[in-house]
């Protein structure tokens, strides 16, 4: 698909999500955060869980604390953010009754999955990188997936090459085993064969 057609198709998909009466639950923010980045053929697509407060404020994925960790991982591996496409499984912020970020429920992830699959179908990535268990479980259709085993592993699913690694949250980054597992996985992203 030519770039203009990809842009148009993504636009139509994002409009369909905004219009879908069941996608955004009452306990989600009302700011739609679309994917962002390169639409080159064979692009690397990074898939997070859902936007947080910072992403909601800027309307872009991974611009808060997790985004800064992600930027560091990319920099270490000579990868430029503008050469990748960055998106989330959920496009709205799941929030608690007090307004804090919360993890999405399994049913919310299931509902969002066909929309993510369509997004990937449009982008046709060379590699899809799942950042954290939520997108990995959803895309690989494996609710029992464990990160200890899955980190750095390459899967083939739904016609995609899928690499699974930890979410670059500050919470994970503080744990030396998890941050070095993330670093190992990102080295694989950088050196993957064409
Ligand atoms: N965490 C995510 O999973 N996605 C974001 O966009 C930000 C933080």
Image (spheres, rainbow, N blue to C red):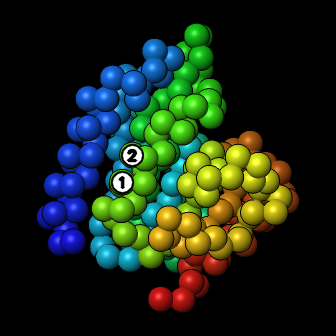
SS label for mark 1: helix
Query: What residue does disc 1 label?
Result: 118
| Residue 103 position by quadrant | top right
> Tag 1: Cα neighbours inside 10 Å, few (<14), some, or many (≥20)?
some
Q: Residue at x 39, y 24 (%)?
A: 22
Tell me how far mark 2 sits from mark 1, CA to CA.
Answer: 5 Å
Q: Is residue 188 above or below residue 16?
A: below
Q: Residue at x 53, y 27 (%)?
A: 94
Total marks in image: 2
Q: In the shown orientation, is residue 154 left or right of residue 5?
A: right
Residue 25 lies, in percent from the top left, at 45, 20
Q: Is residue 63 visible?
A: no
Looking at the image, which is closer to me, 125 or 177? 125
Which mark, by number, is residue 25? none
Q: Residue at x 54, y 89 (%)?
A: 193
Q: Is residue 145 visible?
A: yes
SS label for mark 2: helix
Residue 170 lies, in percent from the top left, at 69, 44
Q: Is residue 179 above or below residue 44?
A: above
Q: Is residue 48 above or below residue 106?
A: below
CB atoms of marks 2 and 1 within 8 Å: yes
Query: What residue does disc 2 label?
Result: 115
């Amino acid at each position: 698909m030519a770039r203009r057609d990809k842009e148009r198709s993504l636009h139509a998909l994002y409009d369909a999500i905004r219009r879908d009466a069941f996608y955004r639950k009452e306990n989600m923010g009302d700011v739609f955060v679309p994917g962002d980045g390169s639409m080159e053929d064979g692009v690397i697509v990074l898939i997070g869980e859902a936007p947080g407060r910072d992403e909601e404020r800027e309307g872009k994925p991974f611009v808060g604390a997790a985004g800064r960790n992600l930027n560091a991982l990319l920099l270490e591996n000579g990868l430029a953010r503008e050469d990748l496409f960055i998106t989330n499984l959920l496009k709205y912020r799941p929030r608690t009754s007090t307004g804090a970020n919360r993890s999405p429920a399994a049913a919310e992830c299931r509902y969002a999955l066909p929309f993510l699959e369509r997004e990937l179908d449009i982008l046709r990535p060379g590699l899809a990188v799942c950042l954290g268990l939520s997108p990995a479980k959803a895309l690989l259709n494996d609710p029992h997936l464990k990160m200890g085993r899955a980190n750095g592993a390459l899967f083939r699913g739904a016609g995609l090459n899928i690499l699974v690694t930890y979410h670059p949250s500050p919470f994970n980054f503080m744990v030396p085993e998890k941050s070095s597992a993330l670093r190992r996985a990102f080295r694989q992203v950088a050196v993957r064969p064409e």
